[in-house]
Image (cartoon, grey):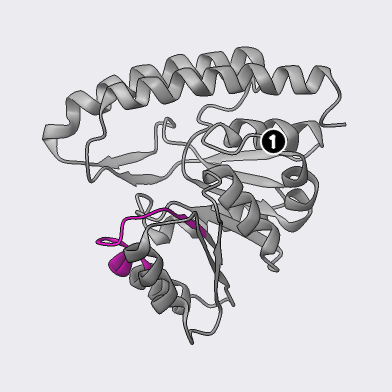
Amino acid sequence: MVVPCYNGADRLPAALAQLSSWLEAQPYDAELILVDDCSGPDAAEVLRAFASGRPGVTLLRNDPNGGKGVSVGRGLRAARAPYRVFTDADLAYPPSEINRILRDLEAGNGVAIACRVLPESRYEMSPSFFHYLYTRHIMSRVFNALVRFVLLRDVLDTQAGLKGFTAAAVEQVFPLVTIPRFGFDVEALFIAQKKGFTVKQTAVHFRYDEEPTSVSFAQSAFVMAGEVLQVRINDWRGRYD
């Protein structure tokens, strides 16, 4: 299990304790790899204290800050398990959803991803977030339409923060990923399909706990749109061969 972390010292202790307790209760052996993307002193100390002396927990630190894509790729490549899953540090996806991803990997898929737009997916949120969710949904659909037109025709939700890869997929995909930040998901999935790995999409439960600004999301979507085009250019140049 890989968790990229950046700041959030106030929420990390509860989230890490919840995830660790859930993993310990599972019938299989699990490793937990925390990747600190050059957090501030408070969050860095929380992560150090949590990992210290805890069997099965590994803490890696990026210095300087590398971005989520760098953190996820580093954690997945450092893992030793045959199935490797990453999730966001805020646990927007309850730990129980991890087993949905694992089942898809065990069924023979090279990649398994959460898909928030499948009819069976469910959201938990405050009613006050509805306007934000509606705005974000529309913007996400526009971004996904671009992704499907340019790169990934059959993938409905590239940006969900819960994904799994087999060890073989990690070894073939992540050494070729060039995008360091949030557009890395699109690039990794494109490379995976190009290498012949199936990408299984599964319905999940998802929780909204806070309301980021739609302006920030719009700015991120604009940058990510450029990254989608960069992936296509990389492919034309043979970067992923």
Magenta extent: 3-16
Residue lying at 35% horizontally and 26% vertically, measured from the top left: 217
Is residue 183 placed above or below 103 in the rendered structure?
Answer: above
Q: Is residue 207 above or below residue 158?
A: below
Quadrant placement of the C terminus: top right
Relative to the observer, which residue lies in front, 5 or 131?
5
Name which residue lies at 34% across and 53% down. Answer: 90
Q: Residue 143: image x %, image y %?
A: 48, 18
Q: Position of residue 101 (x, y in %)?
A: 55, 52
70 in the magenta segment: no
The residue drawn where x is 84% and y is 20% is 237
Name the spot of residue 50 as percent of width and height, x first.
40, 76
Amino acid at the residue labelled 1: Thr
Compared to 234, does 158 lie above or below? Answer: below
Q: Is residue 172 left or right of residue 184?
A: right
Residue under the image location 75 percent in, 49 percent down: 169
Q: Secondary structure at mark 1?
A: loop
Residue behind mark 1: 178
Q: Determine the image quadrant of residue 184.
A: top right
Residue 47: x and y in percent read: 41, 70
Rendered-image quadrant of the N terminus: bottom right
Tell me, yes or no, if residue 56 can be seen here: yes
Name the residue nearer the viewer: 173 or 40.
40
Residue 106 shows in the view: no
